[in-house]
Amino acid sequence: MPPLRPDRTRGQARSAAGTGRRSPATFTLNACRPAEAATQRCPSRNAVVRELPLRTAVERMCQVCATYGSWGRPGTGVGLFLRALTRLGLLYELDSYTGADEDSFLDEEVEQAAAPLHRSPDSNGAGDDEDAEDDNWRAHGEAQQLRINVFKEWRRAAASLHRAQSVLDTFPWLKSWADSPMKLKAEYVASLQKQAARLVSREALLAAARIAAMDTPELPSEEAVFSVLGNPTAVGDQLRSLWRQWRTSIADSWDHPREYDYLTYRLVHKVSSRRKGRDGADPPRTVPRAGPRCSSRT
């Protein structure tokens, strides 16, 4: 639909000149014919050109053109305002992320998921009962997926709130009008933040932050226990690769660093069990940890 064009008729201009008062602005637009009002599109061949006041022009538009049409001239005050208000603008944001829906998680579900997430890996796999062990790991995986979904919803809701607030900062006279839905959005973001906090531990976050800032420590590439991996140069390359993978995995995760002890087995997973010295390589005791030997940027 072509944009509105603010204009004044010659009669209005003469009237304004004679009375000393400014005449109301009119808008030239391609208004939808009544027969086309219920259709999903508004073809240009079924449009007529008329000059109407802004309010009348809006009232005569079909729902599709009023909602999605670019009917404010680009670059004008009206055009900029309508662009910020319609389509995926303020009206859309005020109607989004205002509360829980059918895909949201209840607080009780979050509490149930927090329990396996805060257990140590040893407790998930401990015991002689294989069925119980499988159930523990399955519950842990489902809890991790729930945490991913909660954090995703939290980020999206917070981003929507920020976008809406940015529009209101640009057009502050709309703040009182948008106050009610903005409060709902803020309350929903706060509730998601509380759920997310239950699914991570302070200890894990602090440990991950410290490890992410660590420099590569001095690696024991010349120790005899690693001779099964090759010469000192090859050993050093593998240890540095393992260190980078371990640090990156922890920095990108919400889990405690102890969840990534399994990575140490990648040092020897390609080494034949028949090779001399294979049993002597014990990766879990040689993985670099956050400790006095490691320098930190923080």
Image (spheres, grey):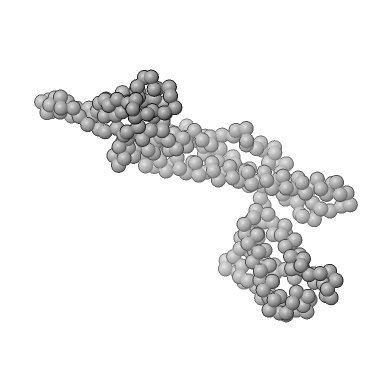
Residue 269: quadrant of the picture = bottom right
Q: Which residue is drawn at 10% across and 25% down?
A: 18
Asked whether 130 or 296 is in front, the reply is 130
| 24 with respect to 124 (left or right) | left
Q: Position of residue 118 (x, y in %)?
A: 72, 50
| 178 with respect to 250 (left or right) | left
Q: Residue at x 56, y 34 (%)?
A: 99
Q: Position of residue 144 (x, y in %)?
A: 69, 48
Please tell me whether residue 34 is drawn above or below residue 1 in the rendered image. Answer: above
Determine if residue 54 is in view. Answer: no
Furthest residue in direction front, as rendered: 45
Q: Where is residue 211 in the image (x, y as percent from the top left)?
A: 63, 64
Which image quarter is the C terminus in? bottom right
Q: Residue at x 72, y 44 (%)?
A: 142
Furthest residue in direction left, as rendered: 18
Q: Residue at x 35, y 32 (%)?
A: 1
Furthest residue in direction top, as rendered: 35
Determine if residue 287 is in view. Answer: yes
| 278 with respect to 263 (left or right) | right
Asked whether 135 or 266 is in front, the reply is 266
Numbered label tally: 0
| 189 with respect to 229 (left or right) | left
